[in-house]
Image: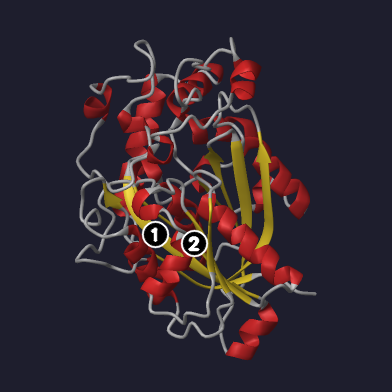
Amino acid sequence: MRDAVIVAAVRTPVGKRGGGLSGIHPVDLAGHVLKALLDDPAPVEDVIFGCVSQSGEQSWNVGRNAVLAAGWSETIPGTTLDRQCGSSQQAAHFAAATVISGQADFVVAGGVESMSRAPMGSSAADAMPFGQAVRDRYRGVEGFADGAQIPFSQGIGAEMIAQRWGLTRAVLDEYSLASHTKAAAADFTDEIAPIAGVTHDEGIRRDTSLEQLAALKTPFKPDGVVTAGSASQISDGAAALAVTTSEKARALGMKPLARIHTAVVTADDPVIMLTAPIPATAKALKRSGLSIDDIGVFEVNEAFASVPLAWLAETGADPARLNPRGGAIALGHPLGATGARLMTSMLFHQRAHGIRYGLQTMCEGGGMANATILELLE
C-alpha cells in the first residue's frame, strides 16, 4: 500500500513587515527554500505552492517561477493554489494525495508570502470578490458588513469568538505574552535556511509585557478585546517539504522523517470565519482512529489569540501541548507560507522530543480549516 512520507522540510526565517526579507522578491524567497530543501532535485515530479495574494510580484504562478529561480530543471512543473491561510498546508495535502494515488512518486509542497511587497487584500484591490448572491445570502447577519468591498472581517470574527467563549482582554493578552515567551526560549536553528543575512525570526518581542499589551487599542470594536498584540503579525517568508512514498524514499536512499497519517479539510460559518479548526480537529481524529490524548503536540495557528483558546475549550486538549514554541502572534504569519512553516516546525519539535503524533490545524478565510496528523517515523 502506498503512503506519503516527508523526507525533508525547511523554511526561511519569518521577516517582519518592512524587515530583513522585504527587499527580496517573493519568487526568490520561494526559490531559496527549494534550493535549501534538496541537494538533488532530480526525483521531483511536481511543485505545489500556496500563495494568497496572487497579484503583482506574486502573480503568474509562483510555484513554477520558484522552480526556475531555484535553478532546478526546466522540466519540473509547478503550480500555485489559494486556500487562504491554509494554502501551503493544503499544498502538502495535495502532494500526499498525489503520491498515494500514484500520479507521481515525489512532490514538493510549500508556500510563500511577502506581505511587505504584496499587501494582504491586494489581489482584490480593483475587484469585488463577493458577488450579489453572497451578499444577499448574508445581508443582515451579525458581523457581515454589506457595504464593504470585503464584507467578511477576520478581526470581527475574532471578536465574535471572544464573546461566544467568554474570553476577556486579560486572557487574550496573557496568551499573547506566553506566545512571545515560548518563542523566545525556542531554538529554530535546524529548520531555518538563513537568507540575506537574516538568521532568526524577526517578530519575537523578548521585552514585551502585560502592561504594554494592555495599552494597545482595539481596532475592530471600540469596546472589543482583540488588539494587534493578540493577533498574528504581518510577515514575509517561505517554507517547503519534500513528500514521497516509503518505497521511493528507500530506492533513493532517503530517510523518511514522518508519515502524513491523516489529512482533512472542512468548513464552518464564513462570518465568524475562524471556528473551523474545531470541527476539522474532530474530523481528523475520527478519520485517524486516534483520541485527543494520543496527540503529543498541537500546532493551532495563532491568527488571533481567541482562535486557539476557543479550540482548547472545545477539544479538551492539554494546554501544555499547544504551540509549545509559540505561534504566529510571536513568529508572524506570512499567509501562503504559514501552513508549511507550521508543519516544518511541528515536525522538528516531534523529532526533538520523540513525539509520535502531532496535529496541525489553522483557520482560513471563508470559514475553512485544514487539519493534518503527522506520525514520526524515527
Task: Read off the residue under disc 2.
Answer: 110
Q: Residue at x 59, y 77 (%)?
A: 45
Q: Earlier in the sequence, mark 2 or mark 1?
A: 2
Residue at the limit of the structure toward the right, as seen here: 1
Q: CA distance from mark 2 to mark 1?
A: 7 Å
Quadrant of res 345 = bottom left
Q: Is 101 on the left-hand or right-hand side of 94?
A: right
Residue 353 is left or right of residue 5, and the answer is left
**Secondary element type, mark 2:** strand
Q: Tally the marks.
A: 2
Quarter holding the C terminus? bottom right
Judged from this view, the residue extending furthest toward the front is 126
> The residue tagged with tag 1: helix, strand or loop?
strand
| Residue for badge 1 | 238
**Tag 2 near tag 1, CB within 8 Å:** yes
Quarter residue 194 falls in: bottom left
| x then y, percent, for residue 87 | 53, 51
Q: Nearer the viewer, residue 140 or 331?
A: 140
Figure check: 123 above or below 8? above
- Counting from the top left corner in percent of width and height, residue 144 is at 53, 17
Residue drawn at the location 38% of the way across and 35% of the way down: 125
Residue 71 in the figure: left or right of residue 91: left
Residue depicted at 41% across the width and 67% down the height: 66
Look at the image and tell me whether residue 162 can be seen.
yes
Residue 86 drawn above or below residue 96: above
Residue at image coords 36%, 62%: 27
Q: Tell me, yes or no, if residue 344 can be seen here.
A: no
Amino acid type, residue under disc 2 in the picture: Gly
Position of residue 12 measured from the top left corner of the image (x, y, whole percent): 34, 62
Colour scheme of this structure image?
secondary structure
